[in-house]
Amino acid sequence: MPGMILKEDIEKVRATADLYDIVSATVSLKPSGTGAYVGLCPFHDEKTPSFSVRPALGVWHCFGCGLGGDVFGYVEHQENIDFRDAVELLADKYHIELHYDQSNAKKEHTGSKRARLLEANEAAQEFFVSQLMTKDALAARKLLDGRNFSQADCQRFGCGYAPQGWDNLVRYLAGKGFTQQEMLDAGLARQGQHGVYDYFRGRVTWPIRDSTGRTLGFGARKLYEDDSISAKYINTPDTTLYRKNQVLYGIDMAKAAIVKKRQVVIVEGYTDVMAMHLAGVDTAIATCGTAFGAEHAKIVRRLIADDSLGAVQLVGPLKVDGQQLSSRIVFTFDGDAAGQKAAIHAFGLDAAFSTQAFVAVADDNLDPCDLRIKRGNEAVRALIANAEPLYDFVIKTAIGRFDTTYTTGQMGAVKAVAPLIAQIRDRSLLDLYSRKAVRQIGVDLDIMQREVRDARRKLNVRDEDAYAPKRRFAANAAAAEPRMEQGVNPYANPSARKALEHRDAAEQSYYRIDDAVFICEQQFMATLIQVPLAVDPTLFASLTLSSFMTPVFRTLFQAIAAAGGLPSTDTPQGLWMHNLTKAGGPMLESVINELAVMQLPLPPSDADTERASQQSQEINVQLRKPTDDERRYASELIIRLLDTGIMRRIGADKRRMAQLPDGAEKIELLGRITKLETLRKDLQARVFGNNVA
């Protein structure tokens, strides 16, 4: 394979890639102070957002799991690829040509490159779409037309046709320059005794894409009785790109509406997704060949985010002025045994959501596609609008299996429903649902409560309270301080400034202490990392290791020196962060990331305001020029550090003087102390004015 990617090309990709757009493709981000955003971490399951992004700096960090880094690091973790592949993937996305150092060329690694697999899938999609209007695709067109899908509808959703035969797609892709190994790795072909052959043959196809619109694989429906594969639906087998428990059909079309409305509708098939969207339910998605599981739940939760009001998690459903306010997940199931089984499976996942899940079941057990055919678009919309809570549906269904007019039927219903109620982790709902159930069954409450307690103990259900205050660090009240509103200038308000500084100290994870010395050192390091040009080079040169008392900041100061000290004005923003992280090494990487996303008690800069208001989609390539407020704040902090360092020297000299007899050495120390005290006053006057006693 080619040698190392040239460094200048890597920096070009780093400067061009927009971290906000890349992260927001999979995470719903909300402003958290000027220029910063928070959301649910895509790399671990959480209910309260602890994932922070600073697009202007090109840095992200999760205070929950500790992961963080630059745009390449995010892509590496998100796509599960190495650094080289991350650079190549972003270069392909932003149409940047990469050049390689051939002197360091290495042997080609096994497996196809991710970018090539994506290209192969796109080429396959073009082929399938082109085949839909051919004579051989009559059966496919009849099937789609019979479900009230027009040609325009099919084009909108990318419906295609995989022709009968053995190697139609293989020959087409070969003509496009794809190797057989790439076809196999993309799941588009299989290896036979006489060569490779098409995986999809004689079927209607749907492209399965990620939230950014990249085709990862396909779903296909059987058309002919002589199909060698008996399954009605087949999907791309698991590949480097396609993982059935992590893909959702329609997410590319529904993502924007899901984020905006904070609602998602989970249906069971490709045609159901089409019917929902055509009926006006534009938040519909479907799983692909598997039940809705925990990984799917994580994807959905990151898009709909959490409901919160102050410190209380409101799991809904909420309404304000008649409008749906809270997040809402609606499952559509058939009312038959299979649908009830699916509902119980979803019931077990409900704890993964910080909102309330609902179930929509149509009369006569019609799926959304058939419902649209028989009763029209309005019936589809009403189906979703009238969905009932998942808890209620599952409990009611379990009770409905028994004839509760008889004592044995009542006890059977209790035994059936108690384990379901016991699975509700939120203890604030246990009593309510127990009371609901006994009213339907007709037994005493204590009978149900006893069975629920026994089942809860046997199932080892973790006890939670969804309505309890959520605090990241409950032991420290400063952590409960509300975040600054976007565009607010805390620097103009001393109390707000102090509150933010103390909250920053409380929320960091690398040094658990809250005092004036630590806060000053922390704020200085954060300012230095975020706005290095705000730091006065002359004052910075006066700093020494003894200016810092906190071990982590002493080490970070040495790392900054190892990185070459303050950057020049023409240093790219991304390169500054990269050099600093590289110099700090694994020990300091998380610290640097946290400081980079930490909110400073400063008014917003023009660059941050543009990004925060979404007026500009461009990230400054070079380090941005600091504002006057940023310069003044940096100088205040550095003067404090220098002043404290001088104070320590004076204290040490005075202690030494007290131990010496009168004489020349004592007089020399007194003169040095006098000079240091004069230096302190001069330094303080530079920033704090002449009101220094």
Image (tube, rainbow, N blue to C red):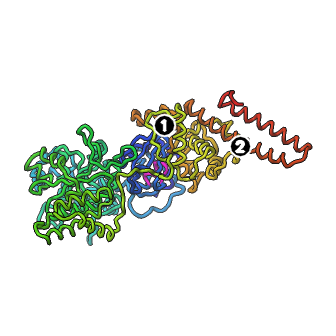
> Which residues make up the magenta segment?
67-76
- Compare residues 140 and 564 and report the one nearer the observer: 564
Residue at screen point 22% across, 53% down: 389
Q: Name the image quarter holding residue 181.
A: bottom left
Figure quadrant of the C terminus: top right
The x and y percentages for residue 624 are 53, 35
Q: Is residue 251 above or below residue 192?
A: above
The residue at which mark 2 appears reads as: 645
Does 539 sit left or right of 32 as displayed? right
Helix or strand or loop: what does disc 2 sit on?
helix
Is residue 73 shown in magenta?
yes
Secondary structure category for the residue under label 1: loop
Residue 220 lies, in percent from the top left, at: 20, 59
Report, in whole angstroms, how far the alpha carbon at label 1 lies from the one at label 2.
36 Å
Question: Measuring 18% from the left and 62% from the top, which residue is drawn there?
Answer: 340
Q: Which residue is mark 1?
A: 620
Q: What percent of the width, then of the height, locates residue 468?
A: 38, 52
* Residue 144: mark: none
Q: Is residue 556 left or right of residue 304?
A: right
Which residue is drawn at the image coordinates 45% and 51% (left, top)? 472
